[in-house]
Image (cartoon, rainbow, N blue to C red):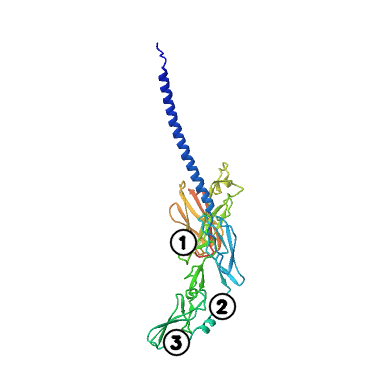
Amino acid sequence: DKWKCPSTQDLLNLLRQVEKVLAVHEASYQQGLRSLRKKMSALHNSTAAIFKTASCPKPEPPAHGRRLGRVFGVGHEVHFMCRPGFDLIGPRTRVCLEALRWSGQQPMCRRESWSWTTVVLISRADLRAASPSPSSSSSPSPSSSSSPTSSSPSSSVRPSHCTHFLGSTRCTCDVGFTISGLDNNICTDIDECRLFPPGRLCVHQCVNTPGSFHCFCPAGYDLSREGRSCTDINECENRMHDCTAEQACVNTFGGFQCVTVACPHMSNATYIRTSPARCERNPCMLGDKACTQAPNSISFHFLSVVSNMSAPRVLFRVSAARVLGDTLRFGLAGGRGRGHFSVQRSGRRTGTLLLVTPIRGPATLEAEVEMSELERHNLLGRYLTKVTLFVSPYQF
Ligand SMILES: [Ca+2]
C-alpha cells in the first residue's frame, strides 16, 4: 500500500485551498483592473480639457478699428484694421502661441496726424470758452476750482486744478500734463516721445497718448515687460514657421529663416550627408588627385545677429579635433560679403572668423572658412566651414 488513496476529507480541503488562492487572485486582478480604468478615465478627462482650452483669450479689436478672425486656437491668426482716417500702430497680424497667448502686442488705431491736430485745436478752443476766468477771490480760506470737464480722458487738453489762497493762485496738472504756456487753467499733454531723443524712451516706435506714451515693436517682436524694449519672438520654438520637413528653421532677430543643407555636386568628388549640417567626401579612387584636393568635409553654420554690430568681433571659431600633419592653415575661402570678414589663427589648432566692419541689416552674408592640413608641405586634407550670417533689419 505504497499509494494510499486520499480521503474525501483531504480532497475537499485541497479543493478549498485552491478555491481560496483563486479568489485572492481574482480580487487582486479586479482591483488592478479598477485602478487601470480609473487612470484611463483621468487621462481621458485631462486630454479632453487640454484640447478644449487650447486657445488664446479673445483679442479685443482696437478702438476705431476691427478684428478679423474668429478662431482663437493655437496656431491661428487674427488680423486688425482701422477705420478710414486712422493708422494702425503695431502688428497687423497676431498668432496664438502654444503658451496660449497672442504674439506681438495689442495694436492701436491712431488718427492720421492732420485730423489729430484738428481735434486738439477744437477741444482747446472749447475748453477756453467753457473755463471760468481765474478768480481773484480774497477769501482767506483756500478754495479749489476745476474747469468744467468738457474733455474726455483721451483728450490731450485738460483743465488744471487751481488753489486760490490769499490772493495767489497755484495750479497743478494731472500726471503727464503740464500748464499750457498761455493759460494757467489749461493743462496740455506732455509729448514724451518728442522730449527724448529717438530710441531713448522706446527702442523702436513711440506713440504719444494723452497723459502718457506707448511703445510699439515691429512685427516679429514682443514688447518686453518693462514696456519699452522689444524681444524677438522665437518662431522656430513656437512652431510659427512654415519650414518643410527637409528644411531647418533658424531663428533670427525679427523673423526666422528656413534653411536647406545640400551637399555640393562636384565633377571630381562626391559627398554624403553625415549629420544635419555636415557633408563628407566619399573615398577617392587611388591616384585621383582632383578628388583628393576637394574638401574632405563641409560643415554648415547659421548665425543670427542684430544690425550694425560693432566691429571687430569674433563670430565663429573653427578647431581641428585631431591633427595628423605638421601644419594647420586657416583662411577665408570665399562667400558673399567677403569684405566684412577676416580669418585669424587664435591657437595652435583654432582659427577665428572675425567681423571686421559693421553690417547694416537686413542682409544675409556668407563666409567660408577653410582649414588645410599639411605634412612637409604636402596637402593632407581640406575642411570647409560655411557660415551664413542673418543680419536683422533692427539693432535689437
Ligand atoms: Ca525671431
Residue in view at x 48 percent, y 37 percent: 33
Q: Residue 118 or 159: which is nearer the viewer?
A: 159
- Quadrant assignment, res 31: top left
Residue 55 numbered tag: none
Kind of residue indicated by mark 1: Arg
Image coordinates of residue 354 in percent, x first then y, are: 48, 59
CA distance separating discs 1 and 2: 51 Å
Residue in view at x 59 percent, y 59 percent: 70
Instruction: Kindly tell me whether residue 363 is visible in this rendering.
Output: yes
Secondary structure under tag 3 reads loop
- Rate crowding at label 1 as few (under 14), some (14 to 19) or many (20 or more) other CA atoms within 10 Å: some
First in sequence: mark 1 vs mark 2: 2
Residue 119 numbered tag: 2
Looking at the rendered image, the quarter that the N terminus falls into is top left
Kind of residue indicated by mark 2: Val
Q: Residue 348 or 274: which is nearer the viewer?
A: 274
Residue in view at x 51 percent, y 47 percent: 45
Q: Total number of numbered labels?
A: 3
Instruction: Kindly tell me whether residue 383 is visible in this rendering.
Output: no
- Rate crowding at label 2 as few (under 14), some (14 to 19) or many (20 or more) other CA atoms within 10 Å: some
Residue position marked by numbered label 3 in the rendering: 135
Q: Residue 57 or 246: which is nearer the viewer?
A: 57
CA distance separating discs 3 and 1: 67 Å
Residue in view at x 44 percent, y 87 percent: 135
Image coordinates of residue 195 in percent, x first then y, are: 47, 75
Check the image and name the residue furthest to the top.
1
CA distance separating discs 3 and 2: 28 Å
Residue position marked by numbered label 1 in the rendering: 313
Secondary structure under tag 2 reads helix
